[in-house]
Structures are given as structure tokens and as C-alpha cells.
Amino acid sequence: MHVKFCGFTQLSDVRTAAQLDVDAVGLVFYPPSPRAVTIEQAQTLSAAVPAFISVVALVVNMSEDELIKLANNVSFDIIQFHGDESPEQCQQLANSVNKRWIKALRINAEQDTLESVNTQVDNFAAAGASSILLDAYHQHKYGGTGARFDWSLIPKESSLPIILAGGLDADNVARAYELPIYAVDVSGGIEIDKGKKDPAKMRAFMKAVKRDRWQNDTLSEPSNINS
């Protein structure tokens, strides 16, 4: 199971996540979010991410010009489209900066069905998405709410690898092993405050997911991570 920690604003938190062998680090480029970072902040944060850990740029309805400016100034590996972007828009935007991409779908239990979710996933797969992220729907927010959606709406046979987000923490993420998913994405479940991570919660989350990597409770701190 792969793990993405999202919504970093603090350099020390990025270093801790890297030390814990997280698979991906998410930076939010959506100004209304309390976890949003500027280009200048992102430059510092992404520079602290070692090789083989992916940097994910979360954007919401960003224009092509803004995305090109972002890609020209910040080192990131994958775009996470988290707004109202259509499959065609995602494809066009990602091609403009030559990046792989994933799309977040906000699942509304009152409207969505397994069939409708599968159809959306298929449409984004056809447009070239690398994975799909399923998050809880909120009428006024594009994510980061800490709410869970109905996991019975996760397709068992999806045309794309599924990343699960929404309301995850160290206490409930073990249930994810029962689900047909590829990865988990957490933000609020590892925080002290929005944008400020809790090292103990990050560590507990990784221990709950990457159980095979944690044979004991001792965690050394490599000097090269904090240099």
C-alpha cells in the first residue's frame, strides 16, 4: 500500500515524512486552502524531498498560464487536479507542462452510484490519468474536510489504480487493506493544526500502513535528511 501525505507547509514536517519513507508529498496550490503554499515556499519544501519520493502539486481549476508558471518554478512530479476539471481539460493542462497526472473525484453518496463512479474513472483513464483519487464531496469545499464517504462506492474493478482519501487516520487506515485500492492519502489525520503536521501521528499512520517495514519502535534520524 502506497502512502501520500498532503498539505505540507513546514520544512521540518517534510523532512520527517521523508525520514518515515512516505511515498509521496503533496503541496497545495489553491489560495483559499489553509494549507496553501506560495511558489517560494514550495521551492524550499520540494528541495527537501529526496529522490524516489514523488512531489505532487494539488491544483484546483488552475489556468494553463498559472500551471506553466508553477511548473517552471517548482520541481514536482505529478499534478493532482482537485477541482471541476474535465478529462479533456486535465489532459490539455498536463500536456502543456509534460507531467503525469491524477484526478480527484468527490464522491456524493446521495447522487453517485458504483456505475457512475466507474464511468467517471473510465473517462479520466481514456484521457491519460495515471490514477484516480476518491474523496468525500462537500458543497463548498474541494477537499481537506476530514470527512469520509461511503466506501461501498469504491469500484472493485477499476480502469485506474484508486487512491483513497477523506477522514483517514492511524486508527482507521488498517481497514483500507480490505478495499480495492492502490494507495491512501491523508492530511488532517496527521495534523496538529491545518498545515502543521504531528510527527507522532505521521509515524503512527506509517506504522499502521507499512507494517512490514516496522519491525520495532526504534526510529533513527539520518543526518542527511536534516542537513
Image: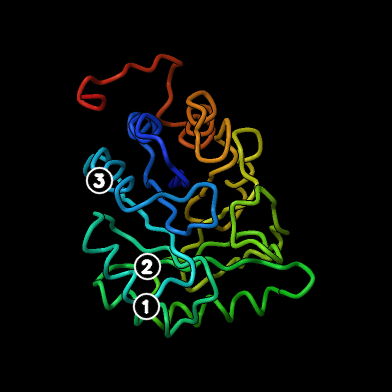
Quarter location, residue 9: top left
- Res. 145 mark: none
User: Left of 220 or right of it: where is 183?
Assistant: right
Q: Residues within 10 Å of mark 2 (few under 14, many from 20)?
A: many
Q: Which residue is mark 2?
A: 101
Cβ atoms at labels 1 and 2 below 8 Å apart: yes
The C terminus - image quarter:
top left
In the image, what residue occupies the spot 43% across and 21% down? 215
65 and 46: which is toward the camera: 65
Identify residue type, mark 3: Phe
Q: Depth-wise, is mark 2 or mark 3 nearer the camera?
A: 2
Callouts 2 and 3 close, C-beta under 8 Å: no
Please state the horizontal and vertical placement of residue 178, each as a whole percent of the image: 62, 49
Q: Three-letter amino acid code at disc 2?
A: Trp
Q: Who comes first in sequence, dot 3 or dot 1?
A: 3
The image quadrant that residue 117 belongs to is bottom right
Q: CA distance from mark 3 to mark 1?
A: 22 Å
Q: Classify residue 220 as left or right of residue 192.
A: left
Colouring rule applied to residues:
rainbow
* Residue receiving disc 1: 128
